[in-house]
Image (tube, rainbow, N blue to C red):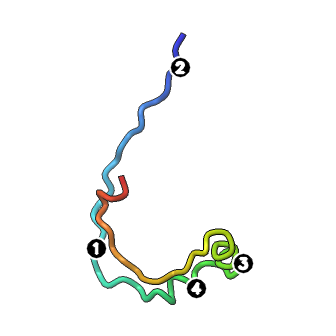
Amino acid sequence: MGIVTPSLMHTESPPVEKGDLPPMEDLVKRIPMPTRDLMEELFRAKFITVKRIPQSALK
């Protein structure tokens, strides 16, 4: 007997208004400090810029 898996349903979300992006500092401040410290320690992650990417890049 084979394994039956449900098919993933793709739902198209409505387009988001393409206004100005918030400043990087505001976005970084939303992340709790312990989380930022851990991200930097584990991944050497630094927040540099905010960019809008096409939705097709997320698929």
From the viewer's perspective, tell me whether residue 3 is left or right of residue 12. Answer: right
Q: Amino acid at mark 2?
A: Ile
Give the residue at mark 2.
3
Task: Report the mark closest to the observer, 3 or 1.
Answer: 3
- In which quarter of the view is residue 23 placed? bottom left
Give the residue at mark 4.
29
Mark toward the start of the polypeptide (4 vs 3): 4
Q: CA distance from mark 4 to mark 3?
A: 12 Å
Give the residue at mark 1.
17
Tell me, yes or no, whether the two marked residues, 3 and 1, touch with CB atoms within 8 Å: no
Q: CA distance from mark 1 to mark 2?
A: 42 Å
Residue at coordinates 61% horizontally, 69% vertically from top-left? 43
SS under mark 1: loop
Give the residue at mark 3.
34
Residue 42, given in percent of the width and then of the height, sits at: 67, 69
From the viewer's perspective, tell me whether residue 12 is left or right of residue 38. Answer: left
From the viewer's perspective, tell me whether residue 24 is left or right of residue 35. Answer: left
The N terminus lies in quadrant = top right
Crowding at mark 3 (Cα within 10 Å: few <14, some 14-19, many 20+):
few
Tell me, yes or no, whether the two marked residues, 1 and 2, touch with CB atoms within 8 Å: no
Q: Amino acid at mark 4?
A: Lys
Residue 33, given in percent of the width and then of the height, sits at: 68, 82
Residue 56, given in percent of the width and then of the height, sits at: 29, 57
Residue 7 vertical placement versus 42 (above, below): above
Residue 12 vertical placement versus 27 (above, below): above
Q: CA distance from mark 1 to mark 4?
A: 23 Å
Mark toward the start of the polypeptide (1 vs 2): 2
Residue at coordinates 30% horizontally, 68% vertically from top-left? 16
Tell me, yes or no, whether the two marked residues, 4 and 3, touch with CB atoms within 8 Å: no
Task: Report the mark closest to the observer, 1 or 2.
Answer: 2
